[in-house]
Image (spheres, rainbow, N blue to C red):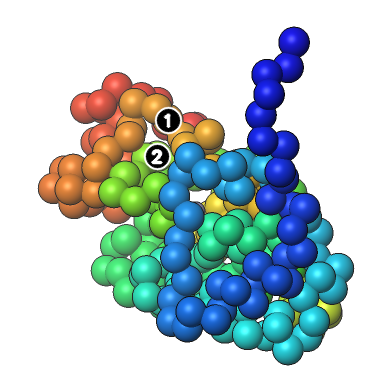
Amino acid sequence: MTPEVDRTHPHDRPVAERVEELLAAGGPLPIVAVGHPVLRLGAEPFHGQLPPALLARFIEALRETMHAAPGVGLAAPQVGVPLRIAVVEDPAPVPEEVRLARGRVPQPFRVLVNPSYEAVGTGRAAFFEGCLSIPGWQAVVARHARVRLRALDEHGAAVDEEFSGWPARIVQHETDHLDGTLYLDRAEPRSLSSNEAVAARWAQPTPERAAAELGFTLPG
Ligand code: ZN
């Protein structure tokens, strides 16, 4: 038995129309919060659904929105656009001990079109992370320490590059968004902490103390 439901799929509407409408408002784009199906459906590969000038304007709006949030990555579904496009940029304004423990090195602005990643080696790294679509919360996520990313850039040039440290975490998080996966799906449930709790208790470079006191395990 299938209940009567609205079967209007967000993919049915011409996406260029949706993007034009979003950009018409000007300024940072509204960020979609968890609970909206667009974050769960998976995004369509980009194959020119936005003409070049509109794509350029959309990428600029993603960048502006990421900066305003502020965040270090933003995927198109997070502004309600179900295309496999994301932007990343991390100035990494963190203390030296954090930089060393987390491998959080600056990452220049870049656009990932149709990205996919695979693990390189078996190393895992677990740290608190958060998401602009799940405001107010963070949790510890064990991720591949090193990944090979394949994508296109905004000009259609092939990208095939390995990432480690915090940049590897960012590209996994953003690519996961395009598959309808949120960091919470991969998180240690017992690590879930408010931003206030993280700031007050779990600001150490690594999450060992949080693991001991909240009762979850870390890889390796
Ligand atoms: Zn996110």
| Residue 6 higher or lower than 25, as above or below | above
Q: What element carries label 2?
A: strand
- Residue type of the residue flagged with mark 1: Glu
In the picture of the structure, the residue carrying the numbered disc 2 is 140
Place residue 214 in its image quadrant. Answer: top left
Q: Where is residue 122 in the image (x, y as percent from the top left)?
A: 65, 40
Instruction: Name the image quarter holding the N terminus.
Output: top right
Instruction: Give yes or no for contact between labels 2 and 1 (Cβ–Cβ under 8 Å).
Output: yes
Q: Where is residue 159 in the image (x, y as percent from the top left)?
A: 78, 72
In the rendered structure, the answer to whether residue 176 lies left or right of residue 106 reads: right
Pointer 2 or 1: first along the chain: 2
In the picture of the structure, the residue carrying the numbered disc 1 is 188
| Residue 45 higher or lower than 121, as above or below | below
- Residue type of the residue flagged with mark 2: Val
In the rendered structure, the answer to whether residue 25 lies left or right of residue 159 reads: left
Report the residue at 52% width, 44% height from top.
36
Seen from this angle, which residue lies furthest bottom? 53
Task: Work out whether residue 119 or residue 199 is closer to the camera in this orientation and state it.
Answer: 199
Task: Work out whether residue 122 or residue 114 is closer to the camera in this orientation and state it.
Answer: 114
